[in-house]
Image (spheres, helix red, strand yellow):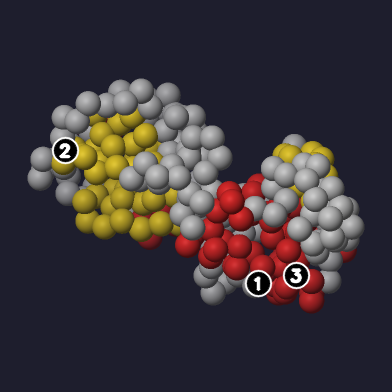
Amino acid sequence: LLVREPRLRLPVPPDLPALVAGQSVLGVTRRAKYLLIEIERGTLILHLGMSGSLRVLPEGSPPGRHDHLDLTLTDGRCLRLRDPRRFGLFVWTPDPPSVVLSRHPLLKDLGPEPLGPGFDGDHLYRTSRGRRVAVKPFLMDGTVVVGVGNIYASESLFLAGIHPSRPSQRIGLDRYRRLAGVIRTVLGASIEQGGTSLRDFVQEDGSPGYFAQSLRVYGRTGEPCPGCGEPVRQRRIGQRSSFYCPRCQR
């Protein structure tokens, strides 16, 4: 392991290169935005942050400005982490992935996967009861559901016709069932189009994601709503910018 810049969201432990040296990779799995790389003595936990990416390159390839670490492989290649904003992390735990998923502080309280069997409108309805928080930050709470960030929360609420500041506990079961279906549709469409490139996000081959061209309200303050023509508005809800149509969303 070659570490060029240890100052990520969580600092890369200085003894990590020695801990992982010579160990074989046994498997790779994912939970939310975390990649779990199982090695012979524990698990490497990797998070790409907002703009990070991984590339497999020939060992010794000249690093770019934001190429912070290389995991060197025995076949003459390396797995390189690029992270312009340094919001990612790369840490180690002695536990296997099965234990990490249920006990590690970073993962143990995560909600269900939005495209998995544990997520539906009934889950959102149950979880929202008694919650004194607006529906948009409620959706972005990783203990409620993982993977629904600012962009996808704004777009999903627009398509479901729900105002982002509506109290989550005041939304009925039928509306939550529609919202859950919309979230699945929006995320699926984004995956098909390679994600949403805003600023410095690119795919592993350097190409951008094209879902930004399909955004209906996010980042479109003052533009006409695609449903009714009313200008799209922007306001801060839960410390994040929110975009919505005041006529279509209630």
> In the rendering, at what x and y percent does residue 90 appear?
38, 37
Q: Earlier in the sequence, mark 3 or mark 2?
A: 2
Check disc 3 and report its element: helix, strand or loop: helix
Q: Amino acid at mark 1?
A: Gly
Residue 153 x/y as whole percent:
68, 54
Q: Residue at x 54, y 35 (%)?
A: 199
Which of 50/219 is in front? 219
- Nearer the observer, 56 or 212: 212
Q: Quadrant of the C terminus?
A: bottom right
The image quarter in which residue 14 lies:
top left
Point 83% across, 71% down: residue: 172
Question: Is 217 rendered above or below residue 5?
Answer: below
What is the x, y in percent for residue 151?
64, 49
Q: Amino acid at mark 3?
A: Tyr
Query: Where residue 217 appears, x then y in whole percent?
Result: 73, 51
Horizontal side of residue 194 vs 14, given as left or right: right
Residue 181's disc number? 1
- Note whether 228 is above or below 23 in the view shown: below
**Badge number at residue 176:** 3
Residue 58's tag is 2
Report if residue 117 is visible in the image.
Answer: yes
Compare residues 197 and 11 and report the one nearer the observer. Answer: 197
Mark 1 → mark 3, Cα distance in angstroms: 9 Å
The residue carrying pointer 3 sits among few (fewer than 14), some (14 to 19) or many (20 or more) residues within 10 Å by Cα, namely many
Question: Residues under labels 1 and 2: Cα distance?
Answer: 42 Å
Instruction: Tell me the mark number nearer the camera, choosing from 3 and 2.
Output: 2
* Residue depicted at 41% across the width and 57% down the height: 30
Circle 1 crowding by C-alpha within 10 Å: few under 14, some 14–19, many from 20: some
Tags 3 and 2 in contact by the CB under 8 Å rule?
no
Task: Check disc 2 and give the amino acid type.
Answer: Pro
Q: Nearer the viewer, residue 168 or 66?
A: 66
Numbered disc in front, either 1 or 3:
1
